[in-house]
Amino acid sequence: MNVSAPLDSDTGEESDTVSDSGLIVAVDGPSGAGKSSASRGAATELGLRYLDTGSMYRALTWWLLDRGVDVGDAGTVGALAAEPRIEVGTDPRAPWVRVNGTDITSVIRTREVTGAVSAVAAVPRVRAHLIAQQRDIIAKAGGVVAEGRDIGTVVAPDAPVKVYLTAAGAERASRRAAETSRSPAATRMDQDRRDRLDSGQSGKADDAVEIDSTHLSLDQVVDTIVRLAREYSGVPHPRHQSQ
Ligand code: DC
């Protein structure tokens, strides 16, 4: 396990950041709701680290596929869960993922990995192992925006700022389709399948603030998360400082 070097001083030195507070911001929600972009943007603005927990499930899935393991065989997947060394970089401006020292930041986004990861993430031994790692990274981060499906409910239920980010299914699919060469209809079918498979691992915490991003820009979502974090930390929003 690895938490990369502290943020560059230009990110952490602002007096209007919450970077010294050890604040944990949990961002959960379904795929395609914009969690990654919003979490990275908010972490950068707040001077916090960033943890993409989905990338850890993807990294394990990539390693299993690379070894030719049948990801439908839950027993084998569970038995191998702790074998690869998975490391993540938590700089929100350039997150990375490594397995046994090999950088796999890009290849974990392929259709092959995306199609297989839900089965891997549903295996209890996989979850127990990766959740323990995630808690350790969060504990050592000194302030982090952590995104996933179960951060506010399971990984960090004591996080003082929790967001549940959603968007209408058609909007999520069209955003995803715009990033790939696939049609919105095909993307929607994949998305519905993943939503079904991931539903057991996903949940909105009772105390999470729900943000429906269907009609919001990325900046508006980032701004809402940043405002919630600043309100909790008692750090004034820059725009409101002179008022
Ligand atoms: O957010 P993502 O698409 O990169 O997530 C990849 C997979 O991992 C997805 O199937 C949901 C699962 N996941 C999970 O079960 N728990 C998390 N905290 C994060 C992701």
Image (cartoon, rainbow, N blue to C red):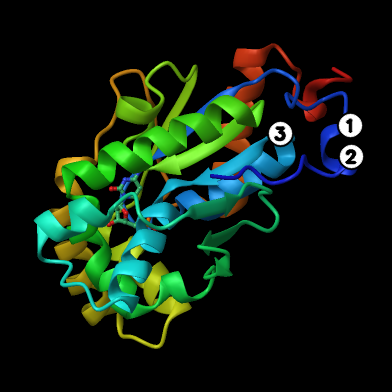
- Counting residues from the start of the chain, the first of labels 3 and 1 encountered is 1
Horizontal relation, residue 200 to residue 31: left or right: left
Residue at 35%, 18% in the rendered image? 207
Q: Which mark is residue 9?
A: 2
Could you say whether the residue bearing mark 3 is in a helix, strand or loop?
A: helix
Above or below — where is 116 with respect to 164? below
Residue 99 seen in the current view:
yes
Front of the two marks 3 and 2: 2
Describe the element under mark 1 as helix, strand or loop.
loop
Q: Residues under labels 3 and 1: Cα distance?
A: 10 Å
Report the residue marked by disc 3.
46
Q: Are marks 1 and 2 in contact (CB under 8 Å)?
A: yes
* Mark 2 residue crowding within 10 angstroms, few (<14) / some (14–19) / many (20+): few
Disc 3 versus disc 1: nearer the observer: 1
x and y percent of residue 190 in the render?
21, 72
- Identify the residue shown where x is 10% and y is 63%: 73
Residue sitting nearer the eye, 41 or 92 = 92
- The residue to which callout 1 is attached is 13
Q: Amino acid at mark 2?
A: Ser
